Image (spheres, grey):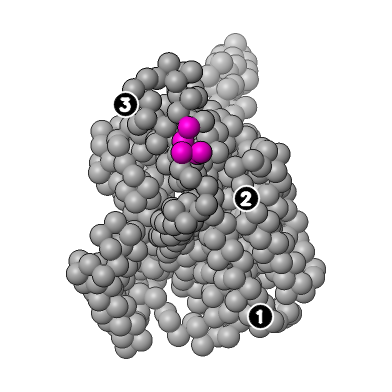
Amino acid sequence: MLAFRRSSTQSPSLTTPDQTNAVSAAPVRADLRSWISPDSPNYKWWVAITVMLNAFIVIMNNATLNLALPPIMTTFGLNIDQVQWIITAYMIASAVMVPTVGWLGSVMGNRNLFLAGLLVFASSSCLCGLAWSGNSLIFFRIIQGLGSGPITPMAMVFLTQVFPTHQRGLAMGLYGLGVSCGPVIGPVLGGYVTEYFSWRMVFYFNMLPGLIGILLVLLVIPNTREEKKSSLDLLGLLAMAVFLVSLLTALSQGQRYGWDDAYIQQLFIIAGIMLVVFLAIELLRKDPLVDLRLFKNLPFAAVSLVLFITAMTFWGTSFLQTFLLQRLLEYTPAQAGFTVLPGALAMAATTIVAGRLVDKVDRRLVVCGGLSMFILASYGFSFLSLDRPMSWMIWMIVGRYVTIGFIFTPMNAVSMMVLPPDKVRMGSGLVNLIQQGLGGTLGLAMMTTVLQRRTAYHADMMAQSQVGSSLPWSDVLTPLHDLMFRAGEVGEMAQIKTMALVQRHLTQHATVAAYQDCFMLVVLLCLFVAPLIYFLRQHRPR
């Protein structure tokens, strides 16, 4: 009896290895839950890390893809009008999804909506890598854009929910840091894998970071659902989609078909009608898809217009920059990536600094300084020539990229500060629609159209100047013909290659002049919106 009692009292101290591991793991799990609990003082930093990673995934995809566009053109036999739809279709799909964030968030819950967007984005990235034609790639990019649409506005909503008002500038700076890391890693990664592997690897690289981002969202973001359900403005959504597609199709194909072609004119008419219908629906509905009444807030309206113009100029010229480096200056994808890298690093470094400055300094000074530097750098690009060394290109790109943090970070912070709390999510979606959707897509279409029209104009002017020149054609062609003869070409083939060389020379110089015109247009547009900075009055939190 005594032995039984002794063994019974000692038995609790005898544990198996599995029990020991379970006991030791329990405090670890408890500590992890306490670290990521909404009641923890460190919780806002966990949310910031989660948001930054997912923003990084989306932006890195676009940064890497830009450098892969020329090889994609070669693989599928696309021209610049067609290849721009790989970017434009993604932006349209993303822009169409942004206004539905309020309705989808109330139906699915904010976390579930964020997760669904990440899942669609990651899975469609794999499909893009498997594309077998230009049309299939554009279709999969549309699906990818539908997934990325809710990610950016919901990320800003999560940050504004966990950071106090006096730290909103810091929150936007952290978000901008995550966004800026994409352009830092993207060009180098995209250029390297495109040159040494394949452009398809650009899409496959989204898979692992996407899975990590999904895991962090499941652990950190609480699964909450709003009691108030909002309705979906389906007619407004359809009108906006038709307006964007019609307008961008007309802008991208106008140079090919002619601006007086009946097809192009019909597209412009449809776009105009759909714009009027969209505005009427949104102003008359009690629960609109896009609350246009927010523009009655003068600072918000000023921010929106400045963001629209600067986004249009930045995204448009960044798209052209890829073809400038790889097609005109004949850089390899890796060289183009390393040329952009210093500018992307400067943008990442200044984004977080700009976020802190917004909390301490009058934001008008920050934006004015950033916009002024952007104007000067864009004006410097107007002196582009074929003889410029790579070091000059690097410094010009640094000059443009370093200013982005001082423009977009304060503007995004202002757009959230000037709105009441119940309008933050709608305002966030509207700002992203203006910045990423309308600004980005119209910027791509506008800059591509301007480049093509000005290239044709300068080519005609050079041809006319050559016809009227006192220098006879024989003095130009004879040295080139001798060069072809020494290279081993004879007869008719030498004549054909001589004329092709002359045509290539004229086209190159016409294209350089067209790029100069595009950057001068950027300067004029930025000067147009510069006076609106005055309306960004300093916000004093209560």
Residue picked out by circle 2: 384
Vertical placement of residue 404 versus 391, above or below? below
For the residues carrying marks 2 and 1, which lies nearer the camera in this image?
Answer: 2
Vertical placement of residue 50 versus 378, above or below? above
Q: Position of residue 293 (x, y in %)?
A: 45, 85
Q: Is 27 within the magenta?
A: no
- What type is the residue that disc 1 sits on? Pro
**Left or right for 3, reference 246:** right
Question: Which of the marked residues, 2 or 3, is nearer the chain's N terminus?
Answer: 2
Residue picked out by circle 3: 492
Q: Residue at x 35, y 31 (%)?
A: 496
417 and 511: which is toward the camera = 511
Q: What residue range appears in magenta? A: 474-478
Q: Is residue 92 visible?
A: yes
Q: Residue at x 60, y 16 (%)?
A: 14
127 and 115: which is toward the camera = 127
Q: Secondary structure at mark 2?
A: loop
- What type is the residue that disc 2 sits on? Leu
Quadrant occupied by the C terminus: bottom right
Quadrant occupied by the N terminus: top right
Q: Secondary structure at mark 1?
A: helix
For label 2, count other residues whose C-alpha is less than 10 Å away and answer few (under 14), some (14-19) or many (20+): some
For label 1, count other residues whose C-alpha is less than 10 Å away and answer few (under 14), some (14-19) or many (20+): few
Q: Residue at x 30, y 82 (%)?
A: 276
Q: Residue at x 51, y 30 (%)?
A: 479
Gap in Å between the C-alphas at discs 2 and 3?
36 Å
Residue picked out by circle 1: 531
For label 3, count other residues whose C-alpha is less than 10 Å away and answer few (under 14), some (14-19) or many (20+): few
Vertical placement of residue 350 versus 19, above or below? below
For the residues carrying marks 2 and 3, which lies nearer the camera in this image?
Answer: 3
Question: Which of the marked residues, 1 or 3, is nearer the chain's N terminus?
Answer: 3
